[in-house]
Image (cartoon, helix red, strand yellow):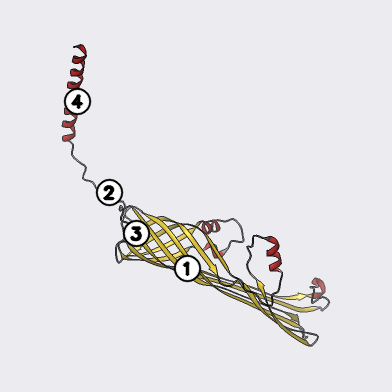
Amino acid sequence: MKKLSVYLGLIILALTFTSDVKAQLSDRINNPSVFTTGTRPVAGNFAFYLGADMEQISELFSDEEDVDVKTAIPLINIRYYKKDDLVYRAGFTMWKKKRVLEGEIDTVSSKPFSLAGQGVGAFYDHTESDAYGLFHVGIEKHFKSSNMLDGYVGASLPFGYSTGKEITNRGIDGSTDYERVSGSRFGLVYGYELYFGFNAFIADLPLSIGTEFGVRGLGLTRNQYNYEVEGSTGGVSYSGEYSTNNIDDFDDTVAQTTADGIQFSSLKTKEFDTKGLLRFTISYYFK
């Protein structure tokens, strides 16, 4: 009987507390405020897109003097929203560099191998130029999500070119002795990218930051220099052709050293690398 009284007391207390809380909740007024957390692009909008992967970021902030320009320049894209959830994109990255050395040689003091003892008046000129261009076309499928976050999957096809030229002239002023070596290379760049990513829209600004994850394959059809040589020594003319390897990342150091030191009468080279993709992006949207 005593236990029953205790149970009844607890039930009455619980009902009283519940009723009081319900009365308090029913008196509350909801806050009608709406906080803007982003602006999603819609069909017909465009976006400028800047993307840099980990290798490019590392090069951009490298303390080393020999920064690889090829990998330091980020990808520049433009997006077009065909539909709210279907996006076409196209972009490019490119660079070009040139180096020139022109000199007169004092052969009495410096005595280079082929010009030793010839006196002041020998010359040596050397010019190098390299260019690289990579274009991208792709498509993205976006998922319905909140106004703040935007997820998508996509694919793109990169294609472009890689070229280089080298010209070396050397000889003796006032004589017929000279040598001219000219080399060139040209290769087509091709590949693919498969990725998924997301954008986080910034406040009510037409900006977003994001990340893309995926896999990328990139190939080069030819990476070799083809040289033409012509010259004259003691009034006797000569000419010739040869090729040299330009691949510089063989894992086998013996193979690398051997390949770098050979003048080939016939040579074929090609490269293709597949690796993971991690890219950080920032986009600006407009109509």
Q: Is residue 30 left or right of residue 271?
A: left
The quarter of the image holding the C terminus is: bottom left
Which residue is under mark 4? 17
What residue is drawn where x is 67% and y is 60%?
252
Which residue is under mark 2? 35
Compare marks 3 and 2 and give the one earlier in the sequence: 2
User: Residue 125's x, y, as percent?
Assistant: 69, 77
Q: CA gap, disc 3 to disc 1?
A: 21 Å
Q: Badges 1 and 2: C-beta atoms under 8 Å apart?
A: no
Q: CA gap, disc 1 to disc 2?
A: 40 Å
Compare marks 4 and 3 and give the one earlier in the sequence: 4
User: Residue 184's x, y, as percent?
Assistant: 62, 77
Foreground tag (1 vs 2):
1
The quarter of the image holding the N terminus is: top left
Quarter residue 77 falls in: bottom left
Q: Amino acid at mark 1?
A: Pro
Q: Badges 3 and 1: C-beta atoms under 8 Å apart?
A: no
Compare marks 1 and 2 and give the one earlier in the sequence: 2
Which residue is under mark 1? 158
Compare marks 4 and 1 and give the one earlier in the sequence: 4
